[in-house]
Amino acid sequence: MSEIKRKLLSAAALVCLGAAFGSVQVVPAQRKTNKRAENPTPAVAVPPAKSKAATQPSSPTATTAKETEIAAVAVQYTYQFTQPQFNPHLVRIEHDAAGRGKVSFERRDDAAPLVEPLEIAPAALVRIKAAWDALAFLDSTENYQAEKQFPHLGTMRLRMTRGTQERAAEFNWTHNPDAEALVKEYRRLGDQQLLVFEITLARQYQPSESVKLVKRLEYLFTHDGLSDASQLLPFLRELSTDERLPLIARNRVEKLVKQIEK
């Protein structure tokens, strides 16, 4: 076979092999997958958390304080003394069950009544309420006026209100021991409040008058004429160091403080 013929046959063979390889398609292997149906977890509803304020009961102390406040507002007590020839010629004390209220004085030389805030000392308030309770005032119809009249001593008027209930009684002399005890407590309370007011006024405008007023205070203390002497201690200690007052007044006040503290 000639050289040219061999070359032609070799070229034809290469062409056939190329065509054969070119017709082969490579198919990539498919990965077998096994998909499982996912069952979603059902949602669980969570109830909202309750606040402590909603779950915890109210404090007994808070409840008791609220009840006391309501009771204090519901009951009102009034004592009034009048005698046109006295000075002051009118004393009115008004307070609630907690002992808070006001005291009013009308004096001949004053253009308007003197009105001061009032807070009755706990020990005095116990005695006052005990006298009211002993009288059973709202449920009673007793006439406290004695057969014999003493109008020159002044007229006492007691008044009590509780809700829709109200009662008042007047007398100038009584044989009822509870009514007498109640009037005595209010008289001492009024004298104490008036004296504190007058001393306060004197130390500002007439310090020399304080000597006479302190003597009056000493007299009331030694004759059981004060509602609660211990309630006056902060006021008296302040007076004993007030250099506006005469030395004799300060010394007497200091002595009185020691007597009260015994």
Image (cartoon, rainbow, N blue to C red):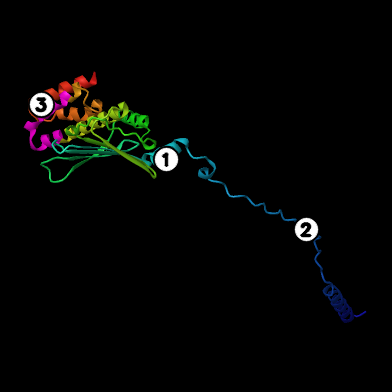
Give the alpha-carbon distance from disc 1 to disc 2, as whole Å: 64 Å
Picture coordinates of residue 212, whole percent (x, y): 9, 28
Type of the residue with mark 2: Ala
Q: Position of residue 6 (x, y in %)?
A: 89, 78
Quickly name the residue at label 1: 66
Residue lying at 13% horizontally and 46% vertically, measured from the top left: 111
Residues packed near mark 1 inside 10 Å, few (<14), some (14 to 19) or many (20 plus):
few
Which residue sits at x=34%, y=36%? 98
Total number of numbered labels? 3
Q: Is residue 153 left or right of residue 39?
A: left
Q: Residues within 10 Å of mark 2 (few under 14, many from 20)?
A: few
Of residues 175 and 148, the one drawn nearer to the viewer in this rendering: 148
Mark 2 to mark 3 CA distance (whole Å): 103 Å
| Tag 3: amino acid | Ala
| Residue bearing mark 2 | 37
Residue 30 placement (x, y as % from top left): 81, 63
Direction from residue 50 to residue 6 in the image, left or right: right
* Viewer-side residue, 148 vs 11: 148
Amino acid type of the residue tagged 1 in the rendering: Lys
Whichever of labels 2 and 3 marks the residue nearer the N terminus, that label is: 2
Residue 160, compared with residue 236, is above or below; it is below
Q: Looking at the rendering, in which quadrant would you find the C terminus?
A: top left
According to the image, label 3 marks what residue? 249
Instruction: Give the magenta-colored segment's residue range.
Output: 198-219
Q: Is residue 164 above or below residue 209?
A: below
Q: Residues within 10 Å of mark 3 (few under 14, many from 20)?
A: many
